[in-house]
Image: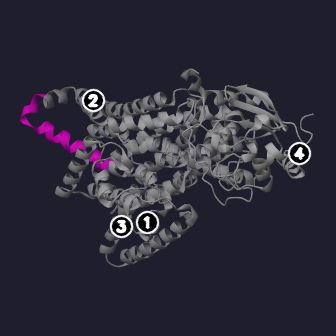
Amino acid sequence: MSWVSILPALIVTGALLFLPGLLLGFLLRLRGMRLLALAPALSVSLVAVAAIAAPFVGIRWSILPVLVLTAVASLAAFFWSKHVGVPARPRTHVSARQLVAIIVSIAVPAALIAFVLVRSMHDPEFFSQRYDNFFHLNAVQYVLDTGNASPLWLGSMTSPAGVPFYPSGWHALVSIVVALSGASVPLATNAMIIVVAAVVWPIGAVFLVRELLGRNQIMTVIAGALAAAFPAFPFLLLHYGVLYPLFLGLAVAPAAIVVAWWLLRPGRVSRRQDWALLLVLVVPGLGVAHPGALMAVVALTVPFVLARLLHQMRAPGRPRVIAIGLLVAYAAVGVVLLQVVRPPGSQIYWPIINTVPDSIGEVVAASVYGYPSSLGITALMIIGAYSVIRRGTYARWSVLAMAVISAVLYIIVSASPYETLRFWFTAPWYNNPPRIAAFWAIGVLPLAALGGIVLVTWLLRQRLLAPVRRFSERLPIVLIAVVVIALVGVTQNAAIRQAAADIEFTYELRPGGPILSPDELDLMEDLDELVPEDAVIAGDPWTGASFAYGVSGRRVLMPHLLMDLTDDAEAINTKLNTDGDSPQVCDALEDTGVAYVLDFSADGDFQENDGDYSGLDDLESSPYVELVEQRGDAKLYKIVSCGLGS
């Protein structure tokens, strides 16, 4: 399929991620880059809260609850700004140089990231054939079928008894894109991936650096180039897992970090109540996108909290008492949050993958989770750290502290032999190294950007480059171009090529893997014409048959590999081929609505079959089914036992 076909979905995705937040942010007196960067975080929060609220008021999930909540929130924001909020300072004029720098800083990483993704995906209708994507694709279809995108409901797809909470922000957003654009679930998913990775993330990364370290035009373009320089984010989560909910949450995390920075800066801060409100507004989106993203923001903003408390402690009298109270409250909230967010012990099973020296080496070499080293990033981080130690300001020390925290957490999760240490510090991320590797990139990006501006400034002061400095003063666009070209050349290296190859592998269609063959996907895409709308399809999920729900819209017995099996499902999975007319199997077929079976090969690279699906083997010789359609080795059978053949 041509990539032109994804344009409507891209437009709808962009509108959904930006327009609600732009309206709300504008009424909260945000302007310029602040408004643009905070819009996605606010939009995700509006969608998250709407998804939770809609079932309680009896509204099916669609764009309607989002529009209603956006209208209500915007009205409240108008009254807040008029009666509670502090008037914003007059807008400063943005020079042409600054505008060019901002545009370049967003356009360059957007183009680089989009190029990697489009090339790796091959086709807008293809999808990542990974363990977690069984759930994510099917969950979007489940939201569309049930009209419920609440995180309190979504887990019921795989656990009829109910899962207390499953982060549903991603699925709520993609389902709206499907409904408004008419795209398939896989195509809408790819549109969301591209917009979040190539637009939302670069804007957030540039915003983070500009707010922490200043709005120098060279600093701005350095931040933009670095947004596309780390394979750990946004690329790692698009082939490992795949972890789309965490990917979404981390993409909007920089905006939340900046709001915390505004709120917690020592000294007099104008509009502090506005920043407190903004922080409250972005937290629901982070939590419903993925609690791990919220905890990443908590971890990376610890330096801001400590600096604020130390500042208060130095003040005599009431401020010191307030500081002590805040410290106790912060610690208490942190412990409670850890208990709430930390997964059950049965889900915290990921082992260490390195020795401590190896993990330290990965951090220093900017090669976390085994990517090839990126010496350019290493050099910038070292220069940045040296500049902080030599001439540190509060902002610079905060940047270094963020990098150190993210590095220490990665070393603990990937190499610490002490499970108690991992339990307390990295369990919110399932003790899973790739999850922390992803936000390590967010933690170190500002430090690398600082190293970049220090290096450029030093080079321009050298006598040998005096002509370049004088020329750049007359034509600053030339210096911007030189810096961007140099950084792109240094950072678009083997690590990025490896990340692209990893993503490409998960999307690849070929006989033998990673899960599906071209014939199997072709058959799945036609199931809506071959299977009645009310019929349910059985199939061994480990062969990729479970993708049929998200691809075709036809329900499957096993929408995920990991789910609570009913007695009916077990009877079908284990006895259909040899005992297909027994009372037990007939009752199971009637109770579940199963009337068809997908028979795919198990020749792919994904062969971790965990479960008994022997009742779905050797169907060609079973008297209880008949062949309906065959594409290569991929077969669709209709069950003819128990009166289903009539």
Of mark 2 and mark 4, the one earlier in the sequence is 2
Question: Which residue is label 2 attached to?
Answer: 485
Of mark 3 and mark 1, the one earlier in the sequence is 3
- The answer to whether 525 appears left or right of 260 in the picture is right
Q: Report the front residue among 351 and 463.
A: 351
Q: CA distance from mark 1 to mark 2?
A: 41 Å
Q: Position of residue 140 (x, y in %)?
A: 66, 42
What is the image's colouring?
A: one colour
Q: Position of residue 145 (x, y in %)?
A: 75, 42
Determine the secondary structure under disc 2.
Answer: helix
The secondary structure that most of the magenta stretch takes on is helix
Q: Which residues are magenta?
A: 445-467
Residue at 54 percent across and 23 percent down: it is: 3
Split into 4 quadrants, where in the image is the N terminus?
Answer: top right
Front tag of 2 and 4: 4
Determine the secondary structure under disc 4.
Answer: loop
Q: Report the front residue among 569 and 530.
A: 569
Q: Which mark is residue 581?
A: 4
Question: Which residue is label 3 attached to?
Answer: 306
Residue at 56 percent across and 20 percent down: it is: 2
Front tag of 3 and 4: 4
User: Residues at badges 1 and 2 in contact (C-beta under 8 Å)?
Assistant: no
Of mark 1 and mark 4, the one earlier in the sequence is 1
Q: Which mark is residue 607?
A: none
Front tag of 1 and 4: 4
Determine the secondary structure under disc 1.
Answer: helix
Front tag of 3 and 1: 1
Of mark 1 and mark 2, the one earlier in the sequence is 1
Disc 3 residue type (three-letter): Leu
Q: Position of residue 116 (x, y in %)?
A: 43, 31
Relative vertical location of residue 66 with respect to residue 109 in this rendering, above or below: below
